[in-house]
Image (cartoon, rainbow, N blue to C red):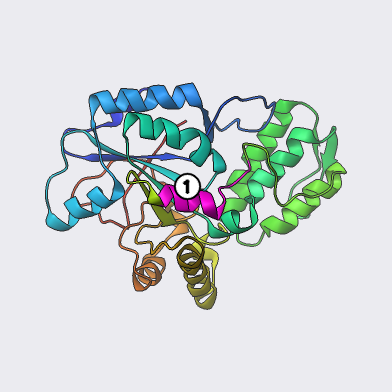
Amino acid sequence: MNYRDRLTETGLAIFLLHGVIEESRYAVRNYTRKHLPKDYFRRFLLDVREAGHPLSMDDVVRHHRERRPFPPRSFAVTFDDGFENNFSVAAPVLEELEIPATFYLTTRFIDENGMSWIDRIEYCLERAPAARLSFSWDAGPRTLRTADDRIKFLEYLRSRVKQDNSIDPDGLVSSVFQQCGLDEVTSSGDPLDLKMSWAQVKKMAASGLFTIGGHSHRHVNLCFLAPDELEREIAVSIRLLKEKAGIRPWHYSYPEGLEYCYSDNVIKVLRKHGIVCSPTAIDGTNDLDTGLFHLKRIMVT
Ligand SMILES: [Zn+2]
């Protein structure tokens, strides 16, 4: 880890995180380090704070609008999805170190303690006995015995499904659970799965240090949606933030966030709903000329 080297003299580094956990006790799950160990997270924050200048995403918008240069070696901290550990583990560390952060929430995850399709498959493969899986769209059966087999299979699914609109992720999840002989889950209390409650979201929003933004309702690729579905997906996410937590968001982030996950049309719909800033998950740093709907981020792992 050397994230201080990603800070630049006149630019802005936006760090992207998902979760922070007290302990890691998994054979397969979290191999991507989507959830960072708490000590590592603390060291990361101390390191970048010592080297740079923390900004909130509200500060970022203000600097951009006023064309006012960012302080030297500026950085912002952001979290996607809405994991409960953001509230219970990450927020106290951020408060102690007085570092602002923005949390982009997937509203169905909050409303139903929901899980993404890939987290559901990870959950299954952590627990499943050895299995042979086959799929109509895949070359041949895959034998999953060791943790390594399972991680390779997850890597394959991640790259395959994210760009292929013809594979229904929910259907794939059902098929994996069924072929592994386990009961399908849609939510779990595991620290890698549990999401914030609306009460916790309200507490986060009331803190002077934290900002809440949207991150879709169902965590789908916004570019895969028909125009009416796109409108509904964004409208529902914004309505729920208002109704359940009293938040009128002007910040958002795109699910998955890569080049194929947002478009001019997606940006148009977000703007219509009052959003002014939506960073991507494309790796890189930013300057004042980077548009607020094209900001790059650096994944912290
Ligand atoms: Zn996400």
Tag 1: amino acid = Asp
CB of mark 1 near ligand 1 (< 8 Å)? yes
The quadrant holding residue 272 is: bottom left
The residue that label 1 is drawn on is 80
Residue 19 visible in image: no
Image position of 250 (left or right of 194): left
Q: Residue 224, how many percent across, how many down?
A: 54, 65
User: What residue do we see at 18% from left, 49% from top?
Assistant: 288
From what the image shows, is residue 219 above or below residue 271?
above
Range of magenta residues: 193-205
Magenta stretch contains residue 270: no
Q: Which of 115 and 297 is in front in this view?
A: 115
From what the image shows, is residue 70 above or below residue 137?
above
Image position of 271 (left or right of 145): left
Number of numbered tags placed on the structure image: 1
Q: Residue 97, how many percent across, how many down?
A: 33, 29
User: What residue do we see at 49% from left, 26% from top?
Assistant: 38
Most frequent secondary structure within the magenta stretch = helix
Magenta stretch contains residue 200: yes
Image position of 109 (left or right of 11): right
Q: Say what secondary structure mark 1 lies in.
A: strand
Label 1 Cα crowd, 10 Å radius (few <14 / some 14-19 / many 20+)? many
Q: Residue 250, how many percent across, how many down?
A: 34, 61
Q: Residue 257, how many percent across, how many down?
A: 45, 52
User: What residue do we see at 28% from left, 28% from top?
Assistant: 49
Image position of 163 (left or right of 1): right
Q: Nearer the viewer, residue 17 or 198?
A: 198
